[in-house]
Image (tube, coloured by chain):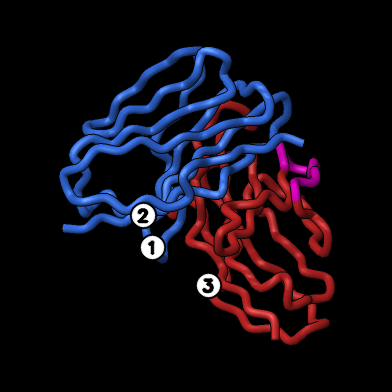
Chain colours: A red, B blue
Amino acid sequence: NAGVTQTPKFQVLKTGQSMTLQCAQDMNHEYMSWYRQDPGMGLRLIHYSVGAGITDQGEVPNGYNVSRSTTEDFPLRLLSAAPSQTSVYFCASSRTASNQPQHFGDGTRLSIL
Amino acid sequence: GQQVMQIPQYQHVQEGEDFTTYCNSSTTLSNIQWYKQRPGGHPVFLIQLVKSGEVKKQKRLTFQFGEAKKNSSLHITATQTTDVGTYFCAGQGGSEKLVFGKGMKLTVNP
């Protein structure tokens, strides 16, 4: 059972480039979310989804897009990468939206030059 | 919007000592969760508290949810080097958003 799989694990981009961080879960979870983790800032919610076809903004959504065309996949798109988006990105999923433990992927370490 | 604050942000203890870390929310929560993240790893779920005044124990860890459901605490007894890591609390209020605190980084002197 793979759980939550994030790819790539590491990525270096140049300012202005776009890219997609992949997240897939094989637990049939309804709820999926993206967080970024920066030193001293904890985990900040970027976007989340309560089910296929439904997405909503978190605390820091600017510069990021998401879509949820299937239950399994929840990709995060950086439209035009900026150095301020250098961070570690975590995808998480849970069975439903409320009162459920989050299962995290291993993270993607992203550097923007 | 909803904010979750953790204190202290850093804690250094001698092996064998007890300590407590606290989590405070700006709004009433429907539940609070605690996670542990080891260096270089991802957050791992520890426990969830739902009821007002709830207390749960996991071996040397004791978790408590405040009566007003706006604060929580984690107490570790007889700290061990295996307890090293960053502990996060996360709360859900009236929406589906799970908001994390900034974390409490624990280091242990053997």
User: Magenta segment: does it hold A94?
Assistant: no
Q: What residue type is disc 2 on?
A: Gly
Tell me the CA gap for discs 1 and 2.
6 Å
User: B65 above or below A113?
Assistant: above
Q: Which of A100/A84 is in front?
A: A84
Query: From the viewer's perspective, is the residue at label 3 or at label 2 nearer?
Result: 2
Residues rendered magenta in the picture: A49-59
Q: What residue type is disc 3 on?
A: Lys
Residue on which the image places disc 1:
B39
Residue pictured at 65% horizontal, 48% vertical:
A33
Residue A9 tag number: 3
Residue A102 tag number: none
**Contact (CB < 8 A) between labels 1 and 3?**
no
> Badge 2: how crowded within 10 Å, few (<14), some, or many (20+)?
many
- Both on one chain, marks 1 and 2? yes
Q: Chain of mark 2?
A: B
Task: Locate residue B23 relative to residue A31 in the image: left or right.
Answer: left
Does dot 3 land on a helix, a strand or a loop?
A: loop
Does dot 1 land on a helix, a strand or a loop?
A: loop
Q: Is residue B13 visible?
A: yes
Residue on which the image places disc 2:
B85
